Amino acid sequence: MDETRDLPERIPKEAREMAGFISLVIDESTTRFGVSVIDTGIRCFRKKCFGTINSEFLFETDEIYWSCTKCQNAGTISGWQGSRWDNS
């Protein structure tokens, strides 16, 4: 995100796709803020994987942890507070 907490207009395709994925996870996760494990319904982006993404809030670090239900794809999102996808 840029200084306005939005996506820059000119970023490489792969970075834009990852940013789109992350923004979807933030949007879905913060819509149900406080639920322990959230089934976002978002499809995993790994090739040949048909899993979906679950997320949960790591309150001690203010991060969103996400993971695929089928493969080992996972990560954390920090700095999401105040972004346009923050519904909390």
Image: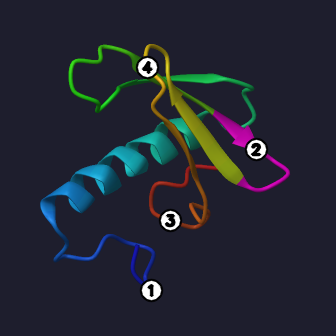
The residues bearing labels 3 and 2 have C-alpha atoms spaced at a distance of 18 Å
Side of 60 where 4 appears, left or right: left
In the image, which residues are magenta? 56-62
Return the residue nearer the eye: 35 or 70.
70
Which badge, 1 or 3, is on the more N-terminal residue?
1
Q: Residue at x 48, y 25 (%)?
A: 72
The image quadrant that residue 71 belongs to is top left
> Percent position (x, y) of residue 43?
33, 24
Instruction: Give SS at disc 4.
Output: loop
Location of mark 2 (residue): 58
Alpha carbon separation for disc pair 1 and 2: 24 Å
SS at badge 3: loop
Q: Which residue is mark 3?
A: 83
Between disc 4 and disc 2, whose residue precedes? 2
Viewer-nearest of labels 4 and 1? Answer: 4
- Look at discs 1 and 2 and give the one toward the viewer: 2
Amino acid type shown at disc 4: Cys
Residue bearing mark 1 = 3
Q: Is residue 67 above or below residue 70?
A: below
In depth, the one of 59 and 50 nearer the eye is 50
